[in-house]
Amino acid sequence: MPATDMAPIVTRVLRTPAVWMIDFVLHGIVVNASNFEKVATALEAGSITAIHDTSAGADEAYYNSDENRYKLGFDTLHTILHIGLIVHESVHAIADIEKVQNKVRASEAAAYVAQALLIYYGAQAAADADPSKNPFADPIMQAAWEVSKPLRATSGQTLSTTQLKPLDDAIIAHDKYRTNKDSSVLSDGI
């Protein structure tokens, strides 16, 4: 069975008002509406592809810069978490397009912050009503939620090393990143 083309879904997500509210710079990656649009345009042109791949896991997504391809374990957007995964992986695509060289932990920090901001903008009223509430069980997303707070409703801001430390600690403690946290991420353009 041929892979389902997910480019239209990814493109639609990248052009939503909540995604376009995300605007920060972290580890040299400029995460903003203009760069999300570059990814959407590359998807439409076919220079980046997106497919449904069940081997990715039902609630997983990946961007592979070697192939300039998203692999999504889901083929419909069941929850805001799926939309958040697309935003997360799109940060990696932005870094690839812009040829921003980073270590895994830096690239993941930017992606998790974008994901947390997307979730915030999707549920802003509830989040603002109880700022002490953290909606995540996952330690990395818990940390991303907290460190992203200074970036809410701002444009082009960044976070200091001290502000990022809880997120960096959560990333390097996670089994998925522990052994490759300081590996270089390929960002060679598309």
Image: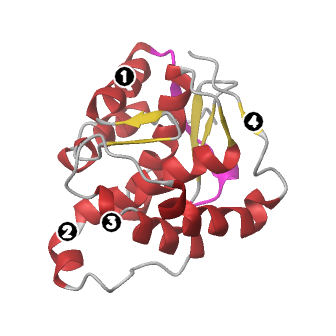
At horizontal 43% and vertical 53% (from top left) the residue drawn is 159
CB of mark 4 within 8 Å of CB of mark 1? no
Q: Nearer the viewer, residue 61 or 28?
A: 28
Q: What is the CA distance from the residue labelled 1 to the residue labelled 3?
A: 26 Å
Q: Which residue is mark 2?
A: 124
Gap between marks 2 and 4, in whole Å?
34 Å
Q: Which image quarter: residue 101?
A: top right
- Answer whether residue 145 is magenta in the image: no
**Pick the front one: 136 or 40:** 136
Q: Quadrant of the N terminus?
A: top right
Q: Position of residue 172 (x, y in %)?
A: 72, 62
Q: Nearer the viewer, mark 3 or mark 2?
A: 3
- Identified by mark 1, the residue type is Lys
Q: Badge 1, how many Cα within 10 Å: few under 14, some, many 20+?
A: some
Q: Tell me, for residue 149, which label it has, or none.
A: 3
Q: Say what amino acid the circle numbered 3 marks.
A: Lys
Q: Marks 2 and 1, how far apart in space?
A: 26 Å
Can the viewer see residue 74 in this picture?
A: no
Q: Residue at x 54, y 37 (%)?
A: 92
How far apart are the two marked residues, 4 and 3, measured between alpha carbons? 28 Å
- In the displayed structure image, the side of residue 150 where residue 100 appears, left or right: right
> Which quadrant is home to the C terminus?
top right
Q: What's drawn in magenta, residue-wise? A: 46-59
Q: Is residue 127 left or right of residue 190?
A: left
- 47 to 181, vertically: above or below: above
Vertical position of residue 121 compared to residue 138: above or below: above
Label 2 is placed on what type of residue?
A: Gln
Between discs 4 and 1, the one toward the N terminus: 1
Circle 1 sits on which residue?
38
